[in-house]
Structure formats: structure tokens, C-alpha cells
Image (cartoon, helix red, strand yellow):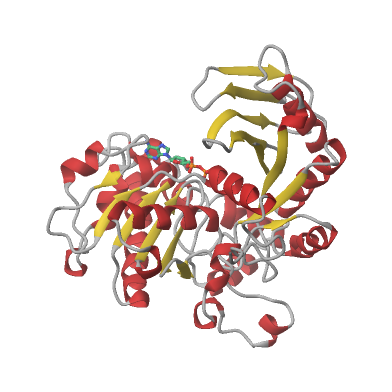
Amino acid sequence: MNILVLNCGSSSIKYQLFDMRDKSVLAKGLVHRVGMAGSKIDHKKGDKGDKVTVSSEILDHKDGIKKVLDLLVSKENGVIKSLNEIKAVGHRVVHGGEKFAGSVLIDQEVLDAVKECVNFAPLHNPPNLKGIEAVLELMPNVKQAGVFDTAFHQTMPSKAFLYALPYMFYEKEKIRRYGFHGTSHRFVSKRASEMLKIPYERSKIITCHLGNGCSIAAVQGGVSVDTSMGHTPLEGLVMGTRCGDIDPAIILHIMKKHELTPQELDNLLNKHSGVQGISGESNDLRDLEEGWPNRSERANLALDVYAYRIRKYIGAYIAVMNGCDALAFTAGVGENSPIIRELACKNLDFLGIKIDMDLNNKTWRGVEGDISTPDAKVRTLVVGTNEELVIAEDTFDLIEGRLDPKTGKPKRK
Ligand code: ADP
């Protein structure tokens, strides 16, 4: 039983084909520059196969998906004989609003609901929808599932998700904290409880997803009780180019003083802030860490602000959950940056977080492990995230009837 996972961005399509018998990756790849000059597909057979690059004009998402399907069945680079071997397609969908607290099978009602959420995620939901619609046309008989970034956080209590604005904004316009990276927080918190051999239903775990976008979540008893991203993925931690938490009055001040349009402000906060904004050098932590701490004063400052914000949230979430069994670092930076983990865990020994520098320095590039000192009350873990696998598993469980197709809740036996 093969399942294709699609993650359609505004100008890219990430794909992975899974064989669900052993959850192995048959093929994976990335379509670059959809609808632009210089489009190409980087394609790999298996998880670790050699990359082949196919340059070709890719007009739009439908064209891109069609070319991916052609590749999957092609003589030279293919891994299946016919498209009939793909039983279902699972899509990453960024924003599900308050409508989706789990993964669902896609029908017209779901499509309409995802369209209603476009307002909340104008950059993300439209390409996600294009992917779903393209598959509807290209493989009309294949079942499709939607797996939402926001769904895992729908368990947050109102005290965590409400902003202190006039209540009308929540009631009428649904302005509230939604949180993102839910698929990753769910996978990583579950994996952390398995690594520690504690029941997920009784665990208290703080998950730190540090990639291009960064967010942190408090996961208590297997459900999200708070997370740092908000109504949009701009709030919370400092990111590569996004500012994270900021005094909202600063935005008004800058807007007036520099006569910026909403679009220009959006650009400033989303694309020119974060560690890029502070360092003036790069949005990539790898660059800023090179030569650390002797690279430059502003690179150090960017790393300090980045790590300090993480540390503040860790303290806050220990307070939220009245304790913590494990702190789990994941995604590009979380899995690969001993420097950020060291800086973020500084001064937390009072709360029971102590990392072993040797273990920390040895744990990166796909190595999973516990990097705490033996006496640390809270275990600090490095966990590889795998959002694509979660999407494939949910899709599989939906089509096999283990999850309710409308709510994504496990069906009672
Ligand atoms: P995305 O959020 O797009 O899924 P990733 O989780 O792969 O991306 O994270 C990408 C980020 O990870 C890059 O911006 C880079 O800063 C960071 N990164 C990758 N490898 C390292 C490393 N060895 N050291 C520090 N940061 C790294």
C-alpha cells in the first residue's frame, strides 16, 4: 500500500512516496520554482538514493504534480509500474482554523472549509488547495487526506489561545492563537515519551521545533496546552527572518514614522527581521555559528537573542505544566546545533535542566539521543522530526478506517 505525501508551497512542491508495509520511503523530491523561469525537479529513489535533477518548464502546481507522477512511473527514475499503485495522497495543509482538530479525508465540505481559512493563511492555504485540486483532476479515483499544522493545538484551553482584545474579535472574526508545526510537535512529543519509556498520556514534554520557522509547545498528557506561534506563524520565538514576539505598539510606530503600507510592514516583520535583521549577515544559523564566538559582535548578539527567547519560553512552559519530564529539540537547528542547545539551556539547572557538553557536541546530523547529565531531573533530548511520515500514517489510518474520516479521532474498536 503506497501513499504519496505532498507539501505544496507557493513556488515549490515537496513529495515523498511511502510504502506503508514497512513505512519505507520509495522516492522523494522537491519541485523548485513552480511557475517561474528555471524550474526543475530534484528527485531521489529511496530515502538516501542519488539525486537526479530534471530541468523542465513547470507551469503551475498541476503541471508540477503531473511531472512528479510521470517521474514516479518512469523507466529510468521510477519506483512503481503504474499510478494505480498509489492508494491515497496525503496533503500538508497549513491552516485548519477551528474547524479541524485532526486529519480528515477530503471531500467538498472539507475543501470549502479550507478555502474559508485562506484569510488566515493567505500565503499557505492557496497552494495547499491547488495541490488537492490538481490531484482531483489527475487521479480522480484516489482518496485524499488533509493533515493540518494547526490541528494538534486545538486542545489548547481558552486561557492560552485568547488574546486580550475586545472579545468580538474572537467571537466574530476568530482571531486567536492557533499555533503551527503541530504535526512535528505531535510526532516529537510522542517519540520523546517513548525514548524515556513514560506513558504519553501522563507525560509533560516541551518540544522545541527550530527550523526556518521556530515554535515551542507545552504538551501535557499527549495534548498541546500552549504554543508560541499565534494567529499566524509570526509570533513567539525569534526565527531566521521573522521577529517573533514584539511590542505591538512598535509596529504602529514604524508604520507611521516610515509611512509603510501593510504589505511593506508584513515584509519587514516576516522577511527582514529575526537573526537576519539583528546580525545583518544571514538568516542561516550555520553562517552565524561559523567561528562562534569570534565571528562578529552582531552575529553573537543574534544568537544570544535567539537562544534567550527559547529559554524564556522553556521557563514559562514549565510553569504552565507545573513541571516537565523532557525538553526535546528538533528540526534543522534543534537537531544540528549544539551551540543553540547549549545557549538555550543555560541557567536552567535550578529547574532541573542540565546538559552534558560532550554528549551535546556529539549529537547532530540525524543522531537521536538524551544529552542530559545523569542527575538532571528533566531529560533534554534531541529528536529527529518526520512530518511527512505522520502525514502518511494519518492518511493510511483514515483510508483503513482506524481514524474517523470527518474528525480524525481514533475509532473505538
Ligand atoms: P524547514 O523549517 O524549512 O522545514 P529545517 O527544519 O530543515 O527547515 O531547518 C532549516 C534550518 O536549519 C536552516 O535555516 C539552518 O539555519 C538550520 N540548520 C541546518 N543545519 C544546521 C547546522 N548544522 N547548524 C545550525 N543550523 C542548521
**Viewer-proximal residue among 63 and 173:** 63
Question: Which residue is drawn at the image coordinates 86% and 41% (left, top)?
Answer: 140
Q: Position of residue 23 (x, y in %)?
A: 53, 37
Task: Point out residue 165 in the picture as x, y percentages from the top left corner.
Answer: 60, 84
Residue 224 seen: yes
Vertical comparison of 153 with 82: above or below: below
Q: Is residue 153 above or below residue 126?
A: below
Query: Foreground residue, 2 or 334?
Result: 2
Can see residue 36? no
Q: Residue at x 35, y 63 (%)?
A: 199
Q: Position of residue 50 (x, y in %)?
A: 53, 17
Residue at 39% over, 52% down: 191
Q: Residue at x 72, y 30 (%)?
A: 85
180 relative position to 355: left or right: right
Q: Position of residue 83 (x, y in %)?
A: 76, 29
Relative to 382, 108 lies left or right: right
Ligand 1 is found in the corner quadrant, namely top left
* Quadrant of the rendering where the N terminus is positioned: top right
Residue 402 appears in which quarter of the rendering? bottom right
404 lies left or right of 282:
right
